[in-house]
Image (cartoon, rainbow, N blue to C red):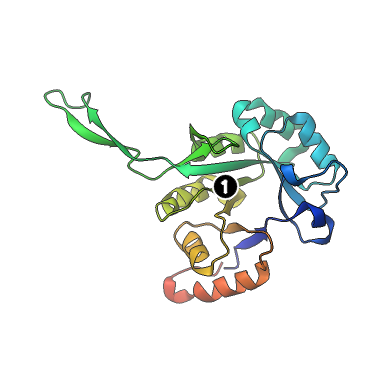
């Protein structure tokens, strides 16, 4: 557990008085200071990025705006370096069946599409795109992104494999928002999803949760302490 970190979502109204955490841009008022905040800007442009950082934000995580225009990330990174990150709201790709008539010359067979659970990126309104989250994260890391925050919609057991893939792809840049502070659920994300940086719901006691989770992830489960 020594390599695990926890932060939480926070309320903009008390930004200056709280520990560092994550904040959605929609909750930010024009005059508010953002010191210590990691601000998610779902549709913001370069001008908005500049304004958020000027207001004290520690970093800005770009969402759908970067998906629509990948040059936004490169331009923002040129200006602000690793203070620019990526926010990926995701859902699992649905498995489906189809006729395979190419690989079999004499007969057709049913073949499954997306046999391995994968995360696909959603737009800001929740609409699912056809963009593979792990691939996109890799491309944006190459462009210089300092962080990849993944928010999982309605997570289930199959998401653990997709999480482990993202953890391998993004490494220490990867932060997971699974929408829960439940110790048992977090144990599965850490133990089987290989998540090491987790974002908890607003109001969560990150210190107590870290301590309780460490007690669950003991050596008997084969979980490394560092």
User: Taking 221 as reference, is 56 left or right?
Assistant: right
User: What percent of the width, then of the height, locates residue 82?
Assistant: 71, 42
- Residue shown at 52% from the left, 38% from the top: 121
Residue name at image x 57 percent, y 48 percent: 151
Residue ranking furthest to the right: 31
Image quadrant in which you'd find residue 213? bottom right
Quadrant showing the N terminus: bottom right
**Front residue of 143 and 60:** 60
Q: Give me the residue at 60% from left, 67% from top.
A: 2
Q: Nearer the viewer, residue 221 or 199?
A: 199
Secondary structure beneath dot 1 equals: strand
User: Where, quadrant-wise, is the C terminus in this rendering?
Assistant: bottom right
Quarter location, residue 197: bottom right
The residue closer to the viewer here, 189 or 185, is 185
Q: Position of residue 198 (x, y in %)?
A: 60, 58
Disc 1 marks which residue? 150
Residue occupying image coordinates x 57% and y 74%: 212
Q: Residues within 10 Å of mark 1 (few under 14, many from 20)?
A: many
Q: Relative to residue 176, is residue 135 depicted above or below?
A: above
Residue 125 is situated, as x and y percent measured from the top left of the image, at 58, 36
Q: Is residue 67 above or below residue 25?
A: above
Given the current orientation, which residue lies at the most extreme left position?
106
Residue 127, horizontal then vertical, whole percent: 52, 35
In the visual, does 155 lie left or right of 105? right
């Amino acid at each position: 557990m020594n390599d695990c970190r926890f932060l939480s979502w926070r309320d903009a109204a008390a930004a200056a008085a709280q520990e560092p955490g994550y904040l959605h841009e929609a909750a930010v008022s024009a005059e508010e200071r953002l010191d210590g905040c990691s601000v998610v800007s779902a549709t913001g442009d370069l001008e908005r990025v500049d304004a958020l950082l000027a207001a004290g934000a520690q970093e800005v995580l770009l969402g759908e705006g970067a998906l629509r225009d990948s040059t936004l990330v490169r331009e923002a990174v040129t200006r602000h370096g690793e203070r620019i990150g990526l926010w990926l709201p995701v859902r699992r790709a649905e498995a489906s069946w189809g006729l395979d008539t190419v690989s079999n010359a004499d007969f057709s067979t049913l073949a499954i599409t997306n046999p391995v659970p994968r995360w696909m990126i959603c737009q800001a309104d929740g609409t699912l795109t056809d963009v593979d989250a792990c691939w996109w994260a890799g491309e944006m890391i190459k462009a210089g992104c300092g962080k990849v925050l993944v928010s999982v919609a309605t997570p289930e057991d199959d998401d653990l494999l997709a999480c482990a893939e993202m953890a391998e792809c993004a490494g220490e840049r990867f932060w997971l928002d699974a929408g829960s502070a439940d110790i048992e659920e977090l144990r599965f994300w850490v133990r089987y999803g290989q998540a090491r940086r987790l974002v908890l719901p607003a109001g969560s006691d990150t210190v107590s949760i870290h301590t309780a989770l460490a007690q669950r992830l003991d050596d008997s489960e084969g979980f490394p302490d560092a």
